[in-house]
Image: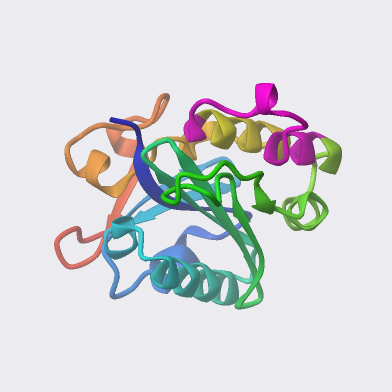
């Protein structure tokens, strides 16, 4: 069985603003340098409308670009870029999944994503999100996610960062228990 997770990454958000924006949600947050990683209970069920809604709200309230990521069984990686309360880009690494059809990735405007996150080269990200041939495709969606993080110049804390895993004490590599901020009724700050 592969990875199942949903999380959100943004740069430059202030801790107090993140905590305020997540009021009423149940979430785990990691602040690493100027990058914030969020995984939230309800969206961890992989409801894409709920993911878009939370990403849009976070981008509006934090006044920062937010990259939402869904990994489904390490077979599909989906991303949403939200800015100023709007979804600006959607990406699906395996749009034929579930239909039994092979299909090339769709969406994933590397220039938009790089511009939103800064400090990276769009060609490198485009190569990750849109491999040239069948031999270049990723075997595991988490490997694609890791390479997206590298192309964006952010730590790969988000890879595998899942609400259920954190709840069981399974933390991303290089994250210590004291690095996790718990938000919500069952996780007071």
Residue range highlighted in magenta? 124-142
Q: Position of residue 137 (x, y in %)?
A: 63, 29
Does 68 sit left or right of 71 as displayed? right
How many callouts does the rendering have? 0
Q: Position of residue 172 (x, y in %)?
A: 38, 31
| Horizontal side of residue 38 vs 120, given as left or right | left
**Above or below 184: residue 162:** above
The answer to whether residue 27 is above or below residue 53 is above
Decide: is 76 above or below 173.
below
Q: Residue at x 62, y 37 (%)?
A: 149
For the N terminus, the quadrant is top left
Between residues 161 and 177, which one lies in front from this camera angle? 161
For this view, does 78 lie left or right of residue 123?
left
Residue beneath the point at 80% across and 34% down? 124
Is residue 69 or residue 131 the one in the foreground?
Answer: 131
Tell me the quadrant of the picture where the C terminus can be found.
bottom left
- Residue 145 lies within the magenta run: no
């Amino acid at each position: 069985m592969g990875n199942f997770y949903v999380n959100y990454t943004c740069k430059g958000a202030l801790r107090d603003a993140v905590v305020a924006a997540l009021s009423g949600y149940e979430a785990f947050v990691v602040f690493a340098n100027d990058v914030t990683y969020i995984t939230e209970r309800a969206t961890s069920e992989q409801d894409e409308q709920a993911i878009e809604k939370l990403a849009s709200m976070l981008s509006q309230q934090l006044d920062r670009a937010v990259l939402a990521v869904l990994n489904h069984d390490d077979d599909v990686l989906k991303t949403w870029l939200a800015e100023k309360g709007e979804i600006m880009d959607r990406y699906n690494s395996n749009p034929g999944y579930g239909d039994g059809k092979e299909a090339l990735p769709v969406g994933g405007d590397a220039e938009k994503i790089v511009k939103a996150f800064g400090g990276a080269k769009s060609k490198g990200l485009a190569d990750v999100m849109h491999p040239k041939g069948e031999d270049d495709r990723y075997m595991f969606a988490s490997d694609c996610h890791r390479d997206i993080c590298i192309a964006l110049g952010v730590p790969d804390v988000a890879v595998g960062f899942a609400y259920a895993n954190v709840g069981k004490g399974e933390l991303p590599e290089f994250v210590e228990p004291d690095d996790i901020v718990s938000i919500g009724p069952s996780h007071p700050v």
